[in-house]
């Protein structure tokens, strides 16, 4: 019996003599667990990002198509208003602060957006033959002004000062 008792004590001693977990071992285990968890999370986030990009791209494409095809109701312009915008841009240049005064019900930004988003590349569609005549008239006035200054015999410095002065006066008159 004493043999059995000694064996039991030895077994207890051997069981109790397992190396206790130290801080470094616990830290390594936690680090390993965190690495595994972070790998799993990173794999999941990568797939989510790829899916989001595809969705966003397709949504953006659809929204862009809708914007091109329809004009919002609050920004609706009549064809005569479109012509007036284009004529005034030809005469005054892109001075929308002045141009917007012709449209009391529209704001400056709506007139500007109408020109830059819709009318800018549709001159001949909206104006028709009027565009060619108005464009030629505006070009001829610029050429005439330059010819008048060139015919006057002045020093080159005086000519450049005159050109600047005339352009500034013209812009003030048009405002």
Image (spheres, grey):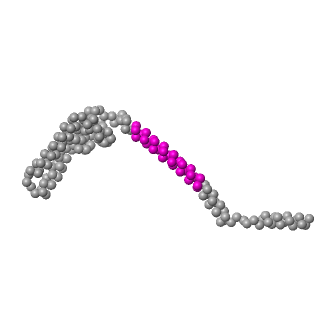
Question: Is the stretch drawn in magenta largely helix, strand or loop?
Answer: helix
> As displayed, is residue 164 above or below residue 114?
below
Residue 58, x across and y down, in percent: 46, 42
The quadrant of the image that shows the C terminus is top left
Residue 170, x across and y down, in percent: 17, 46
Instruction: Based on the picture, tell me whether residue 53 belongs to the magenta stretch.
Output: yes
Residue at left offset 92%, top offset 65% = 1
Instruction: Based on the picture, tell me whether residue 78 belongs to the magenta stretch.
Output: no
Residue 75 visible here: yes
Residue 137, x across and y down, in percent: 17, 40
On the picture, is 70 further left or further right than 157? right
Depth check: give the residue in front, 148 or 16.
148
On the picture, is 162 further left or further right than 86? left
Q: Furthest residue to the left?
A: 153
Residue at left offset 48%, top offset 45% = 54
Depth check: give the residue in front, 173 or 162.
162
Residue 161, x across and y down, in percent: 15, 55
Q: Furthest residue to the right?
A: 1
On the picture, is 89 further left or further right than 11? left
Q: Quadrant of residue 10?
A: bottom right
Looking at the rendering, the stretch of residues picked out in magenta corresponds to 38-66
Residue 111 visible here: no
């Amino acid at each position: 019996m004493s043999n059995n008792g000694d064996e039991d004590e030895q077994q207890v001693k051997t069981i109790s003599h397992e190396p206790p977990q130290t801080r470094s071992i616990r830290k390594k285990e936690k680090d390993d667990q965190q690495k595994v968890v972070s790998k799993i999370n990173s794999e999941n986030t990568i797939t989510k990002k790829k899916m989001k990009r595809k969705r966003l791209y397709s949504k953006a494409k659809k929204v862009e198509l809708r914007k091109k095809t329809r004009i919002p109701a609050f920004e609706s312009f009549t064809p005569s208003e479109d012509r007036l915008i284009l004529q005034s841009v030809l005469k005054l240049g892109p001075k929308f602060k002045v141009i917007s005064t012709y449209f009391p019900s529209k704001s400056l930004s709506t007139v500007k957006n109408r020109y830059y988003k819709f009318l800018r590349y549709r001159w001949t569609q909206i104006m028709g033959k009027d565009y060619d005549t108005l464009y030629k008239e505006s070009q001829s006035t610029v050429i005439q002004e330059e010819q008048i200054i060139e015919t006057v015999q002045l020093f080159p410095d005086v000519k450049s000062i005159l050109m600047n002065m005339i352009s500034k006066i013209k812009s003030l008159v048009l405002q």
